[in-house]
Structure formats: structure tokens, C-alpha cells
Amino acid sequence: MSSSRPPLLALDDALQRLLAAARTLADPESVSTFDADGRVLAQDLVSELHVPPQDNSSMDGYAVASADLSRTGTVLTVTQRIAAGTSGQPLHSGQAARIFTGAPIPPGADAVVMQEDCQTVGEPTDGAPALVRINAVPAPGQWIRRAGEDVTRSSVVLARGARLSPPSLGLAAGIGFDRLSVVRRPRVALFSTGDELVMPGAVAPADMPPGAIYNSNRYFLRAMLLRLGCEVSDLGIVPDKRQATLDALRSAASQHDLILTSGGVSVGEEDHIRPAVMALGALDLWQIAMKPGKPFAYGHVGPCHFIGLPGNPVSSFVTFAVLVRPFLLRLQGASELAATASLARADFDWPRPDGRREFLRVRRNGGGGLDLFANQSSGVLTSAVWGDGLVDNPSGTAIGRGDQVRYLAFADLLS
Ligand code: AMP
Ligand code: MG
């Protein structure tokens, strides 16, 4: 046997190849703004109005002309009362308007004095206007929310490609959108491979045959797909026959945008999905310079993408997070694909780094640093449950206590 192996593919190159193959799904759909959380906008949202529409009060108090109030204790005549949802009349010199939070500032007023700084003078008697003593000297503009300070008319409030979050739904509603045009959900078919796999529920733990393990990947992969806005068809474990595999793949390919599998991409693996994909379309096996998660397959069956993840649970989890997640976001036309890493202090030593880029399971501690999970094996899913993120460690880089490292939070990688 030759000892020369093909060079490993750099993770960034693998990601570029994947992203280059992903086109934004056509045919956007219109959904209720209520149901648009997590979806990617297929349109620019342009505001037809200012938000807020007019200058309005941010306090309960009195609207005044600051020019009337050069000293404290000035007494003004209260000529009107303006509640939220109503509008006032022009204010003249010597006058004040009783005003409430959210109510429009009347013409002639340029400041609001909060009611705690005001005192009504005497008892209001029939017919006679009430008086108010202003015990503060307001600065012009005080306690006024300016028209358009949130959104200005004609501006793009949310751009195509924005992934909608709860506050962005509020903002969209705030400029009058009750429906939004979003990219449709990617349809993903999920297959498992491996004769050792048993579905939990099918066989009790005490009755597991030798060599059998429960299929854990299917559970977290499905959950990660759902969090990324996909429609998932869980097609289970493919029958152990060539023709059945071809049929299953052909029918999945006609109804999905992506077929995702885990397992069976290692060298020398004996599963049928790989040769069947090659027979129906094309498949490249990549050896990516990353740990965990070296073997990875990308191809297609007709127009349907095919991605094969490694079987080891942590490898599957990490390759999904750093490769499949951006790929699925690109299919949805999202403008932000990569999770943002932050710098954090390592509170651990990592003296023997791998030659491949590593993704270490870590957890933030109360002191603002990162602790390392003791067992970094690619089969130990506990590391990803204990941890709250990954250290993205460049190849061959030893880490010493106190070093700054690149930290990727699961909160970002899983949403
Ligand atoms: P493979 O990539 O198929 O060589 O699998 C590598 C390791 O991951 C083996 O120990 C498999 O038993 C395990 N594995 C593969 N698929 C799954 C799965 N769906 N759930 C849990 N472990 C798996
Ligand atoms: Mg296998």
C-alpha cells in the first residue's frame, strides 16, 4: 500500500466549496409577521412613515416653551390636556399643556417638565384655568422623543437577508407590516447509516445485542435542522439493499433540497448510500483538516444537495455547526452565515495540539475564563452537553493557561 495520502482540505476551503454550491431557494413565501421568527427576509422592508410619527412626550408632566422658563418657580396657565392617542392645540407664551407619556408635543412647546417637578397652584375653580408652578428650568428638547428617532420615513428598516428575531418582528409590525416575504424553508431528508444503529424505543437497553448502539445523531441533527428553520423528513435507517437504497434516495431527491446523512463517510466504510449517491449523481469525499470531524462528503442527486457527516456524535455535531449551518443559512439567503467568535481567556492547558484545526468543548466559568471538558474524544457527546461552546484552535497551537483563544458559543452555533 502506498503511504502517500491526499493532503487534507482546509476547513475554510471546504466551507467555501459548500457555500459556492448553495443558491438561495427560489419562490419566497408570504407569512404572517407573527410566524416569521427565525425566517430570512426575501424583501427589503422600507418604512412609509417616521417612527415615532410625531415628537411626543416620554414623561407624564407638562409641555412648555423653554423660553418661558428662565428661572424656577414660574407659574404657567394650563390651557389643555393631551393624552396618548389625542393631539393638542398650539401653545402660546405663558401657557402649559398637561401631557402624558406618548402624547404628541403641541406646536409651540419644546420641552416637557416631569410632573414630579411641577405643582398645581390653588384649587381649579369653575371656568378659571388651572395654574401650575414649574419648579425646574427645562433644557430645550427635554423629555421629548423626536419624530423618526427610531425609524425615518423611506429608510430600509430590515434588509433582504436579515434573519428575523423577536425584536425585528416588532420593528416590522411598527412600520405596518402584518405579512412578510421570506425565503421558503429548506426541505431536508435525514438518513442514518450503520448496521450497528438501533432506535431508542425499538429495543430496551437490557436487550441490546452485542455491538449495537442507539442512534443518537438522528435526534440532535433533527433538532439542529429545525432550529435553523428547515422542514425535516426523517427517513430513518435505509434498508440494507442496493435497489432499496437507490429508490429511497431517488424519491428523497425529488422532494427535498438536501439529503443529510451521518456515518459511513470514513475510508473503507461498507454502506450503500455512498455508492448509490455516486450512481445517481456525484459525491466527493473530503478529508478536512479539522478535529473532530475529518471525513465529510458533499455531492448531489439531481438538483438535490447531498451532505454526509461523520458518524461519531461529536464529529457530526461540530461539522454540522461549522459547515452545514452556514450552508443552510445560505440556502435561505441569509446575509450572515458564520457565528461570530469572541476572544476569551483559557483557564486550562492544552500542551499537545493536533496538526488539524481543533474545536474543543469548553464552558465559561464565573471568572470570565473557559474551562475544558476533560475528555475531548469525538465519541463523547457529554462534552457538548457539559460545554457551552467551542474553542476554535488553529492547527498545531498549544494553549497555556491565561492565553486568549477564539470562543464560539453554542447559543450562536445552534440558532
Ligand atoms: P462511522 O462514521 O460510520 O464510521 O461511525 C463512527 C462512529 O460513530 C462509530 O462508532 C459509529 O457506531 C458511531 N455512529 C455512527 N452513526 C451514529 C449514530 N447515528 N448515532 C450514534 N453513533 C453513531
Ligand atoms: Mg458507520
Image (cartoon, grey):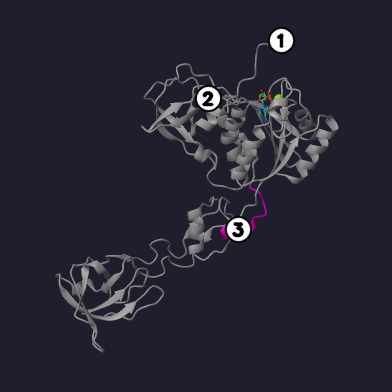
The answer to whether 190 appears left or right of 156 in the picture is right
Q: The residue tagged with tag 1: helix, strand or loop?
A: loop
Q: Quadrant of residue 116?
A: bottom left
Q: Which label sits on residue 311?
A: none
Q: The residue tagged with tag 2: helix, strand or loop?
A: strand
- Residue 26: within the magenta? yes
For mark 3, does the 10 Å Cα neighbourhood hold few (<14), some (14 to 19), or many (20 or more) residues? many
Q: The residue tagged with tag 3: helix, strand or loop?
A: strand
Given contact means CB atoms under 8 Å apart, are the residues at marks 1 and 3 in contact?
no
For mark 1, does the 10 Å Cα neighbourhood hold few (<14), some (14 to 19), or many (20 or more) residues? few
**Residue at horizontal 33%, vertical 73%?**
105
The quadrant of the image that shows the N terminus is top right
Q: Amino acid at mark 1?
A: Met
Residue highlighted by disc 1: 1
The quadrant of the image that shows the C terminus is top right
Q: Nearer the viewer, mark 1 or mark 3?
A: 3
Which residue extends farthest front? 206
Q: CA distance from mark 1 to mark 3?
A: 57 Å
Q: For the magenta stretch, what is the residue range?
A: 24-34
| Quarter holding ligand 1 | top right
Q: CA distance from mark 2 to mark 3?
A: 39 Å
Give the mark nearest the N terminus, 1 or 2. Answer: 1
